[in-house]
Image: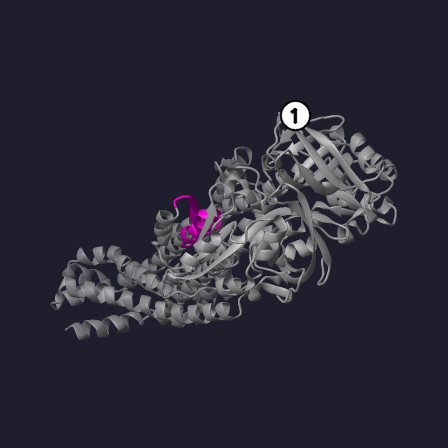
């Protein structure tokens, strides 16, 4: 049967070549398209996680719903002790974030001031690498300020900035800080509203010793994040809750899903048309071979065996095309994962949407390539069903007399 | 003679009914799928642009020089009331509004957040962009200290109707000032600048609050379809920044352009594959009837007559496909235009990127006109190769060979 199928493929060159080319082009395109789609999403998410979020965050249960100082973590050390004993946790740090009004000599602006441990923070976030001027690890009343916020306030290195806000006991907290470092992450909202202060000084000013808004955690292997999150959650006190990055960035994750859905719908248009063309070419080919099938039936070949033959023909052509697509499409996905396409100015254009890199990488994932190719194989096999049904309608005599 | 050719063409086109039906269905189904997608993408972009035009920029906005860069009330338009009056006299301007925006910090009982207090004339905004249609909760009877807040801002600060908030900012004399407001309405525009940060109150209240003249504004927005208006206004107000929608929102303009590029590429690919489909069917159809064409030549049919018949056959099938496609497309586009594609499950994610969660398709006559030309073109081109074969025919050889 295999030999017969092979002979038929080589004999009906036109149909074989068309099916091969359409399958190869659509499969290669699909693999590369999905690699770029997944790559751009993953890059956007990873960059966002890397910049500040971390892979999970631990909060007092109602902080994210209610907010404010009433729902802070009041015993950081207890949580630190738990995290210290979990394998797979790469780093963790506590942050206390509060908003207030910052004023320079001429300008004022809303500002999020965050008390951080600069040393630990460098393991969790990209803040250290985002330094553009001055120093990162400042001491005393030194601020590490976002570049766009500095522009808003019209301040530079060593400028003075006054701040008025609330300490965690709701009393007024006010001080004059010095700008010691300026950073730029590329995330406009963040860079235009954030400033960081070393934790010791912050705690003295805001009465926040051993207290935090939340604790950010990163893990050694992001693919193990959910498993580790479950394991840590079990050990946390009842009034403390852990959120994974998928929960923390649910809006972005949702937006990525929608983008993927539209991406798949768009590419399915191509498959839809190609499916019909392959079906038509297969049907034309089989219509021209009705006499041949009549002869086969008359010498005792069953309908099922003819079905198998037709399936085998399409299967062989498709598999050859898909193998080539896997190599070429897979190589493209692999190559662009290592050497991402760079679109100069993209991050500047899309900064409001959290895009902080000009690079568009791909994701080389064998499972993704496998399912991409399986979809094409399925469609090609589906396209033989109608021709098979058509052939089955003929009795051996009708088929042999067919013109 | 031509009547006979047309009659023969139609009969031959429908000679192989299944094959003809498959081809017609392929054209029709591909066309409706493609146009539905095109309508959806156009509708999505149109909706985003429309929301932005209505809620913020209008077709043209006027700012004081430097305002867009500094976002500071020092750079407001001092004689805005006079300019607005003058603009209202221009016949091609449908509507004009002035706004006064000041950035600061909004604080609820538990949380604080950076935000923009925007002073507007609600009556004029209704005429400008139907602001009442953006209201999700409450109404615009704001009373003395009432305000309308963006939906995302309300969500972040856990604000409900009648919640009290305090807005703090720097006034025109560089003093820090606070204003107590009560939430009377929640607004959702899908314009992220508004939904994430805006608090709307009466424009004169903002002017009083920050201590500026009642004739001043930070932005004057205009609704007009006059393409030459930008140039006229630039000449009229050389000391101000006169910007078009595309200049204010380059990202949305780029999205619109990208949609056109994407739709053009999809259209070309689909039509290319449709062309391959028609080519296959016509090629086989002609090869099967080589003897028939030989006889036709022998009885005096000229090549041009045969060519006309083949072209008419192809055109007949293509037009039937187009008609089927038009009906399917109209049904699908009408449904998507009336009921939309409901993606409320991903509402948060879509809204965070400035998209509405229900996408309504756009319907344009040009979709059908363009597709008609493309299908006619593809059907004519697709018979050139088979016709070459007929042109080389020697009637005697063909009749002998086949008999």
Q: Quadrant of the C terminus of chain B?
A: bottom left
Q: Position of residue A92 (x, y in %)?
A: 77, 35
Q: Position of residue B41 (x, y in %)?
A: 47, 58
Residue B162 position by quadrant? bottom right
Applied colour scheme: one colour
Eyeballing the image, is A206 above or below B316? above
A244, B185: nearer the viewer:
B185
Asked whether B349 falls inside the magenta stretch, the response is: no
Please report the bounds of the magenta region as a residue range: B238-263
Q: Is residue B287 left or right of residue B44?
A: left
A368, A350: nearer the viewer:
A350
Q: Position of residue A61 (x, y in %)?
A: 82, 50
Residue appearing at x 81%, y 30% in the figure: A200
> What is the chief secondary structure element of the magenta stretch?
helix
Q: Is residue A71 left or right of residue A384?
A: right
Q: Which residue is mark 1?
A: A158
Asked whether B261 falls inside the magenta stretch, the response is: yes
Eyeballing the image, is B227 above or below A335? below
């Amino acid at each position: 049967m295999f030999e017969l199928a092979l002979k038929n493929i080589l004999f009906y060159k036109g149909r074989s070549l068309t099916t091969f080319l359409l399958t190869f082009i659509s499969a290669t395109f699909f693999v590369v398209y999905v690699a770029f789609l997944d790559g751009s999403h993953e890059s956007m998410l990873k960059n966002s996680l890397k910049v500040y979020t971390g892979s999970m965050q631990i909060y007092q249960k109602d902080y994210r719903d209610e907010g404010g100082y009433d729902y802070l973590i009041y015993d950081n050390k207890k949580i630190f002790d738990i995290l210290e004993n979990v394998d797979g946790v790469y780093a963790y740090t506590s942050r206390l974030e509060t908003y207030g009004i910052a004023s320079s000599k001429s300008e004022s602006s809303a500002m999020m001031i965050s008390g951080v441990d600069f040393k630990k923070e460098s393991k969790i976030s990209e803040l250290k690498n985002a330094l553009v001027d001055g120093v990162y690890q400042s001491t005393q009343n030194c601020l590490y300020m976002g570049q766009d916020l500095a522009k808003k306030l019209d301040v530079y290195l060593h400028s003075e900035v006054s701040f008025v806000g609330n300490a965690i006991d709701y009393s007024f907290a006010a001080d004059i800080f010095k700008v010691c470092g300026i950073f730029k992450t590329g995330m406009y909202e963040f860079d235009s509203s954030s400033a960081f202060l070393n934790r010791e000084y912050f705690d003295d000013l805001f009465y926040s010793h051993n207290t935090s808004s939340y604790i950010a955690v990163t893990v050694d292997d992001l693919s193990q994040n959910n498993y580790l999150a479950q394991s840590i959650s079990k050990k946390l006190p009842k009034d403390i809750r852990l959120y994974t990055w998928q929960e923390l960035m649910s809006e972005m994750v949702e937006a990525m899903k929608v983008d993927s859905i539209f991406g798949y719908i768009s590419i399915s248009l191509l498959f839809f048309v190609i499916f019909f063309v392959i079906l038509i070419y297969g049907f034309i080919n089989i219509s021209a071979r009705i006499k041949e099938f009549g002869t086969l039936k008359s010498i005792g070949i069953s309908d099922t065996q003819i079905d198998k033959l037709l399936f085998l023909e399409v299967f062989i052509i498709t598999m050859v095309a898909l193998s080539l697509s896997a190599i070429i499409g897979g190589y493209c996905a692999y190559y662009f994962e290592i050497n991402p396409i760079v679109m100069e100015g993209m991050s500047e254009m899309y900064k409001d949407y959290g895009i902080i890199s000009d690079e568009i990488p791909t994701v080389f994932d064998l499972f993704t390539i496998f399912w991409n190719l399986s979809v094409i194989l399925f469609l090609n096999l589906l396209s033989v069903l109608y021709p098979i049904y058509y052939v089955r309608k003929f009795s051996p005599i009708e088929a042999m007399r067919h013109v | 003679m031509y009547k006979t050719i047309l009659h023969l063409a139609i009969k031959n086109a429908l000679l192989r009914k299944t094959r003809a039906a498959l081809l017609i269905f392929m054209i029709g189904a591909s066309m409706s799928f493609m146009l539905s997608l095109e309508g959806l993408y156009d509708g999505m972009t149109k909706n985003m642009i429309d929301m932005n035009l209505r809620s913020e920029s209008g077709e043209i906005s006027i700012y004081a020089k430097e305002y867009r860069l500094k976002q500071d009330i020092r750079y407001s338009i001092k004689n805005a009331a006079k300019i607005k009056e003058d603009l209202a006299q221009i016949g091609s301007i449908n509507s004009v509004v002035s706004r006064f925006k000041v950035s600061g910090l909004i604080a609820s009982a538990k949380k604080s957040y950076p935000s923009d207090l925007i002073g507007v004339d609600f009556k004029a905004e209704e005429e400008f962009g139907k602001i009442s249609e953006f209201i999700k909760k409450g109404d615009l009877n704001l009373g003395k200290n009432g305000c309308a807040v963006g939906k995302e801002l309300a969500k972040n600060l856990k604000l409900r109707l009648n919640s009290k908030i305090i807005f703090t900012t720097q006034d025109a004399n560089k003093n820090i000032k606070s204003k107590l407001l009560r939430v009377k309405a929640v607004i959702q525009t899908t314009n992220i600048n508004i939904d994430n940060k805006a608090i709307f109150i009466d424009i004169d209240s903002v002017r009083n609050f920050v201590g500026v003249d009642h004739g001043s504004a930070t932005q004057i927005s205009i609704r007009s379809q006059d393409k030459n208006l930008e140039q006229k206004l630039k000449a009229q107000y050389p000391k101000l920044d006169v910007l078009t929608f595309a200049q204010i929102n380059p990202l949305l303009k780029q999205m619109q352009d990208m949609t056109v590029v994407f739709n053009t590429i999809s259209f070309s690919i689909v039509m290319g594959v449709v062309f391959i489909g028609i080519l296959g069917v016509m090629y086989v159809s002609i090869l099967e009837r080589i003897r028939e064409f030989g006889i036709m030549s022998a009885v005096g049919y000229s090549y041009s007559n045969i060519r006309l018949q083949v072209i008419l056959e192809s055109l007949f099938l293509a037009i039937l496909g187009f008609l089927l496609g038009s009906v399917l497309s109209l049904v699908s586009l009408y449904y998507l235009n009336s009921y939309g594609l409901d993606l409320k499950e991903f509402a948060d994610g879509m809204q965070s990127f400035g998209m509405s969660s229900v996408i309504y398709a756009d319907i344009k006559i040009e979709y059908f006109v363009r597709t008609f030309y493309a299908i006619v073109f593809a059907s004519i081109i697709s018979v050139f190769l088979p016709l070459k074969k007929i042109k080389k025919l020697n009637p005697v050889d063909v009749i002998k060979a086949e008999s």
